Image (cartoon, rainbow, N blue to C red):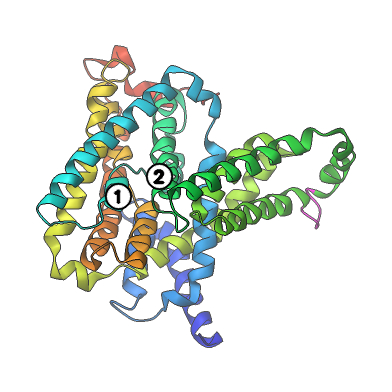
Amino acid sequence: MDVQTALVTLLAVAIVSALAPFVVAMSGRLRLPQVVVLIVGGVIIGPEVLQWADPASVTLIADVGLGFLFLMAGYELDLSLFAEHVGRRALVGWFVTAGIAIAVTGLLASVGFVHAFVPVALGLTTTAFGALLPILRDNDMLGGRFASFVMPAGAVGEFLPIVGIAIFLSANGKFLGLASLVAMLLVALLFTVLPRLTFLARFSSTFRQGEHATSQTTLRLTVALLFVLLVVASEFGLDVVLGAFLAGVVLRRWAPGDVRSLETKLDAVGYGFFIPVFFVASGMNLDLASIAEAPLRLVVFFVLLLVVRGLPTMFLYRKDLGLSQRWQMTLLTATALPILVALAEIGLRTGHMLPENAAALVGAGVLSMMIFPGLAVALHKRGAPGPDSHRGGDDDLRGSGIP
């Protein structure tokens, strides 16, 4: 790939990223999420439409953007929630979804609609937690009772499918995949213990002195941690998003110095550059021709994301949340994209997934990202307490943050 093509592509991506907030502002009542604008912008500048950009030339940067997306998702997750009711409810919800996904995918496989049973079944259990974070943050949906339920539900919808990929779709086989996963978790645990060792305490002064200077010590160490776990995950034959997610979980407990300042810097680096590149590249890579040839497949997967992953929420949280909030949970948990991209790539690489199904699965994820969060935000903005608001009405969304 020549340098000129790469620079032109980066310019086109940068223009789409820079214009996205203004397009959102002009969308008025549509309340378009920036993620949607970035993806559509990628489609427009990509090889399927205007042909201004070559997605292959920004693959590495897009992968780093995906890493930052999962890093931020892991960082936002408070593991203590899983010792509480909200965490246990999230786990139960995911396993219920997994059971439904297995049954539905088995039915589709029996009629010849799908050939790749495992990737499709895992795909129907995913939630784009990392991709939803900027939308939830921009719309003040990360505080209060509702957030305490949606955060763990989104996290398990992202983390457990990654574990499934590591075990069932590992290039090294199921046993070695499981062993690699355990080893990866031990590496992550080691990083949480290291800062507590006495002989490393002497470096804390260096952290504090350099974190706001040109050396930017904490930010550089954070980026190094991200790449260490990405490389370790890759060496173990695991999906790199597992490494990124664990890096975020580790960082929450490990981050030295001024944590709030570090969060601001990570937002600037991640959401300012790398993460938008990932979403624009996702739009550029969307195979519109395959989708146009078999549009019914995209519709089927899109509906299944809502039915399989989303609708169980309506029943599982009926004693915890009001009707409006349960609809918001349904829409948000049914939103998927990053892991669907990974599953499609794995299915195509192994030859187990039909190209039209891979394109339809990713297309359904893009469509879910374009429609479901916007509807959830619209319900949140309405903020009208329903008759069951005593069980956690919409006003709870504006409460204090999650511990």
Look at the magenta stretch and give its main secondary structure.
Answer: loop
Amino acid beneath label 2? Gly
Residue 227 in the image, given as x and y percentages of width and height: 63, 56
Range shown magenta: 211-216
- Crowd tier of the residue under label 2, counting other residues whose Cα lies within 10 Å: few below 14, some 14–19, many 20 or above: some
Please indicate whether residue 239 sits to the left or right of residue 101 in the image. Answer: right
Tell me the quarter of the picture where residue 310 sits: top left
247 in relation to 18, above or below: above
| Residue positioned most to the left | 111
Please indicate whether residue 274 sits to the left or right of residue 47 in the image. Answer: right
Residue 331 in the image, given as x and y percentages of width and height: 27, 38
- Crowd tier of the residue under label 1, counting other residues whose Cα lies within 10 Å: few below 14, some 14–19, many 20 or above: many
299 in relation to 147, above or below: below
Residue 366 in the image, given as x and y percentages of width and height: 30, 56
Amino acid beneath label 1? Val
Residue in the image at 71% along x and 51% along y: 219
Residue in the image at 46% along x and 70% along y: 13
Residue in the image at 13% along x and 45% along y: 107
**Residue 400 seen from this side:** no
Please indicate whether residue 124 sits to the left or right of residue 403 in the image. Answer: left
Q: Is the Cβ of the residue at disc 1 closer than 8 Å to that at disc 2?
A: yes
Q: In this figure, which residue is indicated by the disc labeled 2?
A: 164
401 in relation to 46, above or below: above
Q: In this figure, which residue is indicated by the disc labeled 1?
A: 118
